[in-house]
Amino acid sequence: MTIRAVEFRAVSKRYGAVTALETISLAIDRGTLVTLLGPSGCGKTTMLRLIAGLEQASTGQIMVEGKDVTLLSATERDVSMVFQSYALFPHMTVLENVCYGLRASGIRKSRAVELAQAKLSLVGLSGYGARLPSELSGGQQQRVAVARAIVLEPKVLLFDEPLSNLDAKLRRHVREEIHELQRSLSLTVIYVTHDQQEALAISDRIIVMSMARVAQDGTPRGLYEQPNSHFVADFIGDANIVPVVIEGRQNELASVRLGPLQLTLPHHGAVAGPAELSIRPQAVLLSRGTSGLSGRVERAAYLGSHMEYWITIAGLDKELFVIAQDVMAPLGVGDEVSLTFGRTGVALVPREHLELG
């Protein structure tokens, strides 16, 4: 039987007339890494703070490992949180910071030191216990914050934008460390970020938030390849969103007209009539033939591993952004091209979802 680490049952959060979270019901399985993804103000950090006990729900129930924690304080929930600022005590050594929660819970000093040193070793900071936080790099401070959280062996580990203070290269390195730690210890991790690439890279599951609601919930691949709304398609990665007409449906497939092209795609509930098509940049296939949409290269950029093109399409009032792997024979500005699409990365956005977000 699947064990639910966290469950929201019709949970909402309001601050006076402002709704920060609107009637959310969902469950998170034990041992998974789930990311709450969305723009600022969408409700993702509010959800995290409700789980941590730093905020109280206005309505509904919050369950942790089957226990109702809705009215419990933060210290009674067996949940640990790594904050965006790391929140390390500047006057304490690294070892003292990691020991702090253990000592506060009544564990004797010798045992607390033993456990703290073991967790510092786990995050690659053996020998750093005597240093102050100010003597560490940003990445090292982040590891101390993680060690301080996991030393308490929480049922759920929460991360609130933990990599936002790091540069791009270090972000990639540290996010993989967090992912590896989560897998090796079978931790239940709920991770908040607004960085789509970060979410796609580490998550077992992504919950996309928009305007205090869940916009879509699924695997990274599922959300990227089959977004259910304009908002999700546009927010997760790059997407070209173009108007199309659904001319008919048969079983699970729809006949879709895009200029001179006739496409057959899963309809995902979309009905006949106007709709939108989400086209990922990598799904566009370029050639010098005449079998697809006619286009013209307006801009081109060489990025080492691939080319980026911006192409105007005859009959469409917009440019398509295209990523092509062929860097040996690149197209030039002004070149006439034909565009067709690959088997994945092209998805219908149903008409009833167009206003979401």
Image (tube, rainbow, N blue to C red):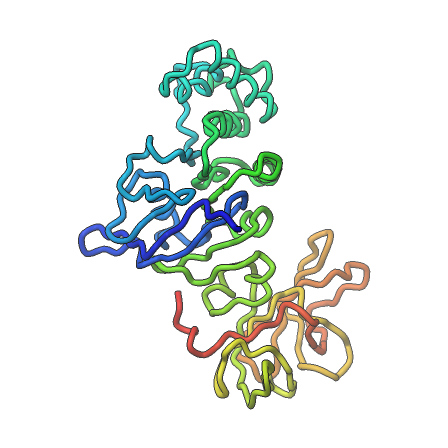
Q: As rendered, which of 51 and 87 lies closer to the eye?
A: 51
**x and y percent of residue 102 in the render?**
42, 20
Residue at 62%, 79% (x, y): give it: 265
Check the image and report above or below for 78 versus 283: above
Name the residue located 57 percent from the left edge and 56 percent from the top edge. Answer: 220
Considering every residue shown, the one lying at the far front of the view is: 1
Q: Is residue 243 left or right of residue 341?
A: left
Name of the residue lying farthest toward the left: 16
Q: How many marks?
A: 0
Locate residue 323, reporting x and y percent.
67, 63
Q: Is residue 151 left or right of residue 294?
A: left
The location of residue 222, given as percent across then percent down, is 58, 62
Q: Nearer the viewer, residue 252 or 170?
A: 252
Q: Residue at x 44, y 18 (%)?
A: 99
Compared to residue 79, the image places residue 50 above or below, namely below
In the rendered view, tell whether residue 279 sits above or below residue 351. Answer: above
Tell which residue pokes out farthest to the right in this image: 328
Q: Where on the picture, by quarter, is residue 172?
A: top right
Residue 326 on image: x %, y %: 77, 62
Question: Image quadrant for the C terminus?
Answer: bottom left
Which is more toward the observer, 16 or 90? 16
Q: Quadrant of residue 262?
A: bottom right
The outermost residue toward the top is: 110
